Image: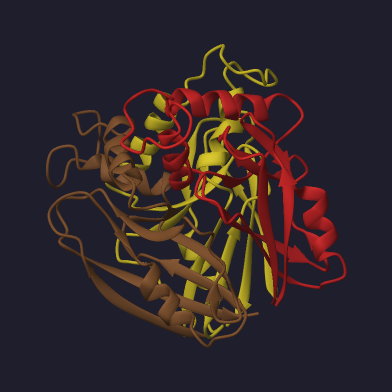
Chain colours: A brown, B red, C yellow
Amino acid sequence: MKSRQFTVETGGRPVVVDLTAEAAAFVAGEGDGLLSVFVPHATAGVAIVETGWGSDRDLIDHLATLFPRDERWTHRHGSPGHGADHVIPAFIAPSTTIPVVAGELALGTWQSIVLVDPNDDNRNRTVRFSFVSG
Amino acid sequence: MKSRQFTVETGGRPVVVDLTAEAAAFVAGEGDGLLSVFVPHATAGVAIVETGWGSDRDLIDHLATLFPRDERWTHRHGSPGHGADHVIPAFIAPSTTIPVVAGELALGTWQSIVLVDPNDDNRNRTVRFSFVSG
Amino acid sequence: MKSRQFTVETGGRPVVVDLTAEAAAFVAGEGDGLLSVFVPHATAGVAIVETGWGSDRDLIDHLATLFPRDERWTHRHGSPGHGADHVIPAFIAPSTTIPVVAGELALGTWQSIVLVDPNDDNRNRTVRFSFVSG
């Protein structure tokens, strides 16, 4: 299995980082199979969404609505409300798979593979791509 | 890798469409492996849930509660509140995998594979099945 | 494909059950590939989260906030509010995959693979591990 880890700079605010170009380059020439996208972090996730028309901003804002950064969380390490960041990956999982056909991601026109990082406390993140030939 | 796309008619309202029979037919005779179910759309997802006792209706209704179709969304194309449809796939992802054992889906008794389409603006959807032999 | 089912005791309250040690043992010596973790139930899910610092408790509590156990659900079998348990797996899916490198789960330091069971009505659950060599 071809597998590679790399680092993404996410800075000090909640962000959505597009990984599609890196993923496309990773599977180029690989034939048919499944691409696994995995982030080895407890406070980040992977999603497949449209970017560029405001939906990435909407996602970050709506995470703050559904998972308020208040005093409700038992987990109390890190910045205020950081307990929310530990619950979010149960909903936006750190793992997804994308079919690959003839070395190309079988994504739709408006789909991008993104890292979702609601966490202010980590400035860099690791992403792992793995390709299983089919 | 055996991979096939097909079209599902979803009409002009939010719907849950059962894909289980098509998936079972796709893997019949394929031995052991993983079935990837993927929808190449930015406003639809795939889930594994019970159908037939009201939970599909409950899911559609609860999406409208958790992702209100109001003015909060930055993304403003399409019908009112359509921005919500672009955030939902971060939570109900357009990708899942199901283990296949001896050519049969290893689903539980009450599980169905469904397309979740909250979007009023698309009347047809594409679904891709891919089978990776294990 | 190596595939195995086993039973987990979940008792009569909502729980998060750590499956990481069992998963690590399952893939030990298997080389590179993808581990599929699948629960064949319509009212349980699989997540990859931190455990041991309160986030498992936070997850269970927040499920009760986002999916209230009240009279809103059409599905009316089981204990009061049980309809919520049938909608949760659309958000916390019963399926995930984890990359395996040289017989080890490629998890981050703080990640655990967990069974999420919001349901009071089932005291035992089945989990299936499957390994596809890459």
Q: Residue at 81% across / 53% down in the picture? A: B22
Compared across the picture, whether B112 is left or right of B121 comes to right
Q: Residue at 21% across / 49% down in the picture? A: A14
Examine the rendered structure and indicate whether residue A53 appears above or below residue C82.
below
Q: Residue at 52% across / 34% down in the picture? A: C118
Quadrant location of the C terminus of chain B in the rendered image: bottom right
Choose between B52 and C50: the one closer to the eye: B52
Residue B63 percent across, percent down from the top left? 51, 29
Instruction: Place residue C56 in its image quadrant.
Output: top left
Q: Residue at 46% across / 43% down in the picture? A: B91
Choose between B59 and B45: the one closer to the eye: B45
Residue A45 percent across, percent down from the top left? 36, 55
Q: Does residue C4 appear in the picture of this structure? A: yes
Q: Does residue A43 appear in the picture of this structure? A: no
Choose between C59 and A7: the one closer to the eye: A7
Compared across the picture, whether C68 is left or right of C53 comes to right
Choose between B29 and C20: the one closer to the eye: B29
Instruction: Place residue A34 in its image quadrant.
Output: bottom right
